[in-house]
Structure formats: C-alpha cells, structure tokens
Image (spheres, rainbow, N blue to C red):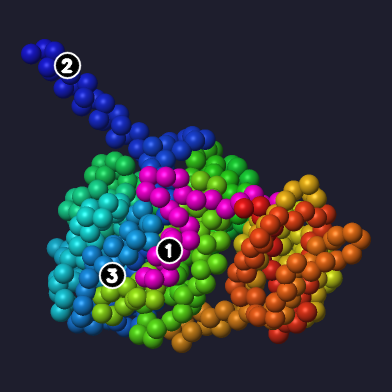
C-alpha cells in the first residue's frame, strides 16, 4: 500500500513539475512547448465571422448577429483542405476585434448561438482536426469593440470576462496547442494582466504556446516596436508583452539572420517567430464577396522556405467565403503548393537550397535620391524583407560579386511593388514596375545573358536552370520599367 502511495505521489509530483516547466523561463534553448511549436512549423490561419458578411476587415462591433448567415457551412472541408495542403495545425479566429464569438459563449449574446446559423464553429473545427490528425490552435482578440465591459470604468471586469471566455475555449474543445492574442495596442501592456492570463492558460493547457502580436519593443517600458528586420542581435530588444512563448509581428517577415534571445527585466529568454501570410494577393484576412486572385505558386514556395527556416514557423491565411466554404481556386492553389514542396507527415519541413549571394558585395548603376542609407544596393542581399535597393532611373543594373567556386542553379527575386489600397480601407493591390529585364553572368571577360524576359517580373520571380553555373559576378539588367525598379532581395541559390 505504501509502495502504491509512493508511486502515486511521484507521478503527481512529476505531472506538477512538467506542468510548471511549460511556462517560459530564462533560457538560450527552446523549452518543450517551443520545440513542439517548431515541430509543427506550418499551419493554416482561418479568419471567419461577421466581417465575412459585412465586407469589413475590422468591424466595430455593431454589425448585427443576423448578418452572420453562411448558407453551406462546412468546417470539415476547411480542415480537409488543410490536411491535403500539408498543414500540421489549424489556427482559428475565435473572436476578432469586433467581439463576435464563433462558439456559444455564456458570457455574451454576440455569438453564433444568437445568429441564424448556430453551429459551434470552434467545436466543429476542433472535431475535424482530430479526424484528420491536425493540431488545433486559436486566435483571440484582446481588443473587444462590442462588449460593454471593455469600455467600463473597472477594466478588471473585462479581464474577468476574457478569462471566463478563455476558460470555455480551453476546457470544452480538447487540446489547444497555441493561443494567438491580438489587439493589445488599444491598451497599455500592463492593463491586460498578462501574467495572470498566461498562468491561467498554462493551468488549463500546460503545453499551449502563448503569443501576443507586436511582442518585442526597442526599449523596455516604451512602445516603439522592433521590426523583424532589426532582430539580428541577441539580447538587444525587450518584451512588450510578457510572458509570451513566441514572437509575433503580423504581417512582417523575419530576417535571414533572425535571432532568438530577448530580454525581460535583465533576463534573457528564447523566442521563435511565427509568420503570418495571406494566400490572397490583396492581403485581405476576411474573404470578400468578389473572387480575388491568389499569390503565384513561385512566391508562395519561396516565402514558405523563408518563413519556416531558421527555427521559425508560418501560418497562411485561407478564409472561407460567405457560403461557409473555402473557395475552390484557393484550395487548389494551396494543395498544389504542397505537391510542389513535398511535405511528408512526421518529417522535417522541406528547405530551400544554399544562398551563395547572402551579404555579398553589391553595386548598382544608381540609387534613388542618392540615399545609400535607405535605398543602397547592399540591401538587395542583406537578408531582410523590409529593406530594399531602389534605382534612380527606369533603366538600371544591380551587380553582385560571388565566389566563383560556388555553383548555383536557381535565382529568386523579390520585387518591391507600389501599393494601391482597396475600397475596404485595408486590402491592397500590388503594382509591379519591372517590365523587361535579363540576368547576366561575367564569363571570359564579358557579360553573357543566361535569362531574358519581357514579361513583368511579378512579386517574386523564380528562375530554375537545367544545370549549375559558376561566376565571379552576376547582374540584373533592367531594360524597361514603369517606375524606378526596386528589389527587396536578389537571391542566388544552389538547390
């Protein structure tokens, strides 16, 4: 009997220790929760709610629940598409800034239970994830533009409301692997009582990873966000939202030299970065009534490699439409991407080749405004997606110095595009500038063309060669453009 009690006590002690170990502590390596997150690596983001029917990206909480009325709601289809696309988890919007809840919450009547279609979407997606072998994660907006408690004199009552809703989400739908908080900018960081909320989450779901959008700031106690492009030095920047298990800056893309160590009260914590991308070219999160084009497969493939590299993760937003289904052309695109990538269950996510141009010496025929600090040629190979080279003329060249012993058989070019905003005030439409160009290598004392095109370059141009080249110099020769050309990254790769 004593032996049985001892075993029971040890088992209980082990469970308590393991549960406590899931909370973030100072470290220069990932903890078990973060390791599980990195193993997942690739998820489908699903935005769906009243905004789907109002045409808004951020509605203000006054859209009536009667507007929510999907005619062919099929949550199983969403997750089936996710499985076929090679995603390993689904990240579902449960409540956006408008406050509308996709489950029957006993703390509000601004939810699906009060709408014409009362299906518990959170429950159905969770069930479908179990069916198809995917992990389940949730997004929950801290900001709530509908709930009266949010604007009340005692903000602590709203924190109670939020904690009660999180309890519903974390106790009624099985394992939740991740919580993605958003909207924190509307209040001071300390007002959210994150230590309390974080601790509550970990008690209910010990292995759940918790992140808050705009996690990192330049200096402790200030609200000037650190851009992912600047996150290339360990222990330089600090938490704005603590505790958090991972970094977020939606929708920025991390630097190739992304670092993982961030400070809070003088202690260093390991934090991976989760990227968010939209499948749509218009960068809209909620689906619109009009059918919109998606990103090209080449761009999606290169962004996949970039965002899942360097111990970071990626979620791609694929929103259902007003019928309650993912549109066929979007489902086909993301599934085709998986066929191209060859993602295998239980295997490491596929990687890009070796970048032989990263941080190479670069020169350009001109620089926009002669501003080398802002638009210099060096930014085309610096590994950052928020920095860029921009020319002063519509005819221009960009020349990279390479190690001629290094072979390459692939080039990817991310072109900077002008942007036109959509009528919803949020969506945007990119306008390409480079219309006619060629790629040349230095060979036998002269420039030799290895690629030529008079088709607009596009957001991301990928060129595959049938065999490998070696050269000491390679250049982009822009022959025609509608505006001075600009390049985020010019990558020379051995695949």
Q: Toward the viewer: 180 or 365?
A: 365
Mark identifier at residue 109: none
Range covered by the magenta-colored residues: 331-356
Question: Which residue is labeled 3 in the image?
Answer: 99
Q: Who's the residue at 24% across and 25% down the image?
A: 13
Q: Looking at the image, is mark 2 or mark 1 earlier in the sequence?
A: 2
Q: Who's the residue at 39% across and 86% down the image?
A: 290
Residue 240 visible within the image: no
Q: Is residue 247 above or below residue 253?
A: above
Can you tell which quarter of the image residue 21 is in? top left
Q: Looking at the image, is mark 3 or mark 1 earlier in the sequence?
A: 3
Say which element carries label 1: strand
Which marked residue is nearer to the observer: mark 3 or mark 1?
1
Whether tag 2 and tag 1 are in contact, CB under 8 A, the answer is: no
Mark identifier at residue 316: 1
Q: Toward the viewer: 103 or 77?
A: 77
Which residue occupies the extreme left position in the image? 1
Question: Which residue is labeled 2 in the image?
Answer: 6
Q: Looking at the image, is mark 3 or mark 2 earlier in the sequence?
A: 2
Q: Is residue 129 magenta-colored?
A: no
Q: Residues within 10 Å of mark 1 (few under 14, many from 20)?
A: many
């Amino acid at each position: 009997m004593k032996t049985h009690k001892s075993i029971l006590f040890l088992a209980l002690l082990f469970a308590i220790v393991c549960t406590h170990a899931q909370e973030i502590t100072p470290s220069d390596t990932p903890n078990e929760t973060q390791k599980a997150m990195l193993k997942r690596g690739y998820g489908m983001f699903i935005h769906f709610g009243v905004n789907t029917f109002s045409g808004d990206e951020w509605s203000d909480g006054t859209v009536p629940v009667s507007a929510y009325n999907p005619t062919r709601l099929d949550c199983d289809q969403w997750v089936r598409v996710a499985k076929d696309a090679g995603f390993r988890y689904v990240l579902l919007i449960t409540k956006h800034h408008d406050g509308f809840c996709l489950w029957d919450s006993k703390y509000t009547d601004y939810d699906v239970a009060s709408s014409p279609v009362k299906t518990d979407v959170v429950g159905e997606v969770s069930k479908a994830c179990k069916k198809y072998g995917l992990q389940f994660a949730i997004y929950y907006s801290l900001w709530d533009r509908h709930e009266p408690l949010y604007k009340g004199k005692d903000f602590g009552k709203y924190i109670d409301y939020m904690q009660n809703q999180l309890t519903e989400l974390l106790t009624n739908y099985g394992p939740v692997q991740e919580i993605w908080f958003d909207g924190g900018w509307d209040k001071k960081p300390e007002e959210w009582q994150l230590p309390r909320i974080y601790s509550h989450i970990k008690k209910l779901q010990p292995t759940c990873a918790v992140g808050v959008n705009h996690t990192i700031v330049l200096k402790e106690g200030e609200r000037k966000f650190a851009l992912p492009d600047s996150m290339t030095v360990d222990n330089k920047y600090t938490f704005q939202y603590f505790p958090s298990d991972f970094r977020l800056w939606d929708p920025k893309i991390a630097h190739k030299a992304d670092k993982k160590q961030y400070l809070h009260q003088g202690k260093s914590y390991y934090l991976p970065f989760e990227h968010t991308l939209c499948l749509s070219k218009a960068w809209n999160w909620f689906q619109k009534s009009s059918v919109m084009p998606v990103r090209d497969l080449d761009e999606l493939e290169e962004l996949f490699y970039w965002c899942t590299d360097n111990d970071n993760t990626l979620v791609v937003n694929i929103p259902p439409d007003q019928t309650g289904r993912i549109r066929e052309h979007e489902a086909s695109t993301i599934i085709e991407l998986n066929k191209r990538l060859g993602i295998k269950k239980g295997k490491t996510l596929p990687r890009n080749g070796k970048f032989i141009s990263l941080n190479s010496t670069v020169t350009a025929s001109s620089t926009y405004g002669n501003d080398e600090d802002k638009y210099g040629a060096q930014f085309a190979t610096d590994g950052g997606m928020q920095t860029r080279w921009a020319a002063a003329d519509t005819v221009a060249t960009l020349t990279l110095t390479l190690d001629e012993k290094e072979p390459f058989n692939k080039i990817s070019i991310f072109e900077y595009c002008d942007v036109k905003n959509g009528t919803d005030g949020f969506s945007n439409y990119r306008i390409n500038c480079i219309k006619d160009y060629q790629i040349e290598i230095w060979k036998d004392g002269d420039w030799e063309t290895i690629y030529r095109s008079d088709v607009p370059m596009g957001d991301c141009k990928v060129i595959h060669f049938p065999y490998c080249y070696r050269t000491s110099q390679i250049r982009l020769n822009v022959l025609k453009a509608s505006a001075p050309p600009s390049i985020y990254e010019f990558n020379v790769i051995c695949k």
